[in-house]
Image (cartoon, rainbow, N blue to C red):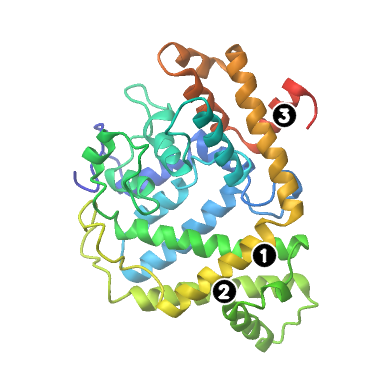
Amino acid sequence: MEAHYRFYEIDKDFRNPYARDRDRVIHSGSFRKLEYKTQVFLNQEGDFFRTRLTHSIEVSQIARSITSHLGLNESLAEAIALSHDLGHTPFGHIGGDTLDECLKRDGFGNGFEHNFQSFRVVSSLEKRYNGFNGLNLTFATLEGILKHSYPYKKSFLPPVIDEQFNLDTHPSIEAMVVDRADEIAYITHDIDDGVNSGLISFDDLQESELIKEILEKVKNEGVEECDDEMFRYRFVSHLINHLVYSLIEYSKDRVDNSKILCATVDSKTELPIGFEPKLETEIKKLKKILFSKLYQHKDIMVKMFAGKQAIRGLYSGLNEEPKMLPAFYRAQLSSRNKHRVIADYIASMSDRHALSFYNEMYGKL
């Protein structure tokens, strides 16, 4: 299937096909709900902290910058970036893990996986057109969402997915760029949010040579750490620039930008997008530091535990009394499995909707 083809025919308009994909995603209900979905800090923690929406916008900006410099398709990268987190549940990764546990406990071996859920959102769960389900995005955009993480073949994917998207091949280079832009975005903004919240300090991160190098650049500008907000802003700017320029420099002679390469390059082939080996090692080390010192901080764990209980409670309550489902989902119970309908509904919720509904069921959490 050609990169710009769609599964359902549509009228032509003034936009290129990937810009049209981007616009369809931006105007979807699932995209709007990202505003109140957790990245690391629950939405109720304050207006400053990133949510899934602001994260997706930052990923899009970074991906556009990289693809533009490498002569790739900027609109395709933007469409994939804005779509890549649409399948996330409330309460971040812990919400998805909990929903996965609930489904598997009830005998649904395929469980829940947020990358495939993002694909399902845009290919079937959004209902905005009369003639078909989903947003009818191009093959290239769908492939980029589906093949968000390697390996692409997974036990829960139905055979028709392999038939349509050839899971033995890499996605487009634009999709690879989005994957690394995602990494750059969450590393930098998690540090920013973590320091701003007081849960970690730059001293906590000094084990990382990469962080030491970036801190030195900020200090060389004459910005003092006591000027907290300015110091964080300059740190984030330098870290993003360092990673983006490093990725471009390492990748620029390795990419084929002559056309969009969908379902073409064998998945055993080395990815052309990345960092030089020493920096890859430093990034892995930094992620381990963030995991132990930020993501597992007791204050974060308390909030995530509350989110876990909310997901379990919603799943249990809705299975016991599915008439509590909204009419759109209740109507699906006659043709789809009840547990999966309930999981799709919970996954679609924002944090505040999930907490509010839980509190209606059980009293304030």
SS at badge 1? helix
Mark number, residue 192? 1
Q: Position of residue 334 (x, y in %)?
A: 44, 10
Identified at 24% across, 32% down, the residue is 9
Indicate whether 269 appears above or below 231. above
Of residue 349 and residue 9, the one placed in the foreground of this image is 349
Q: Quadrant of residue 20?
A: top left
Looking at marks 1 and 3 on the same chain, the residue that comes earlier in the sequence is marked by 1
Residue neighbourhood size for the residue with mark 2, other residues' Cα within 10 Å, grouped as few (<14), some (14–19), many (≥20): many
Can you say which quadrant of the picture contains the N terminus? top left
**Contact, CB < 8 Å: mark 2 with mark 3?**
no
Indicate whether 125 appears above or below 361. below
Indicate whether 242 appears above or below 1. below
Looking at marks 2 and 1 on the same chain, the residue that comes earlier in the sequence is marked by 1
Identify the amino acid type marked 2: Leu
Q: Position of residue 33 (x, y in %)?
A: 58, 38
Can you say which quadrant of the picture contains the C terminus? top right
Q: CA distance from mark 2 to mark 1?
A: 11 Å
Identify the amino acid type marked 3: Ser
Label 3 sits on residue: 356
Identified at 26% across, 57% down, the residue is 267
Of residue 161 and residue 224, the one placed in the foreground of this image is 161
Q: CA distance from mark 2 to mark 3?
A: 38 Å
Label 2 sits on residue: 239
Identified at 28% across, 66% down, the residue is 270
Q: Quadrant of residue 37?
A: top right
Identify the amino acid type marked 1: Asp
Q: CA distance from mark 1 to mark 3?
A: 29 Å
Looking at marks 2 and 3 on the same chain, the residue that comes earlier in the sequence is marked by 2
Along the horizontal axis of the image, is 241 left or right of 64? right
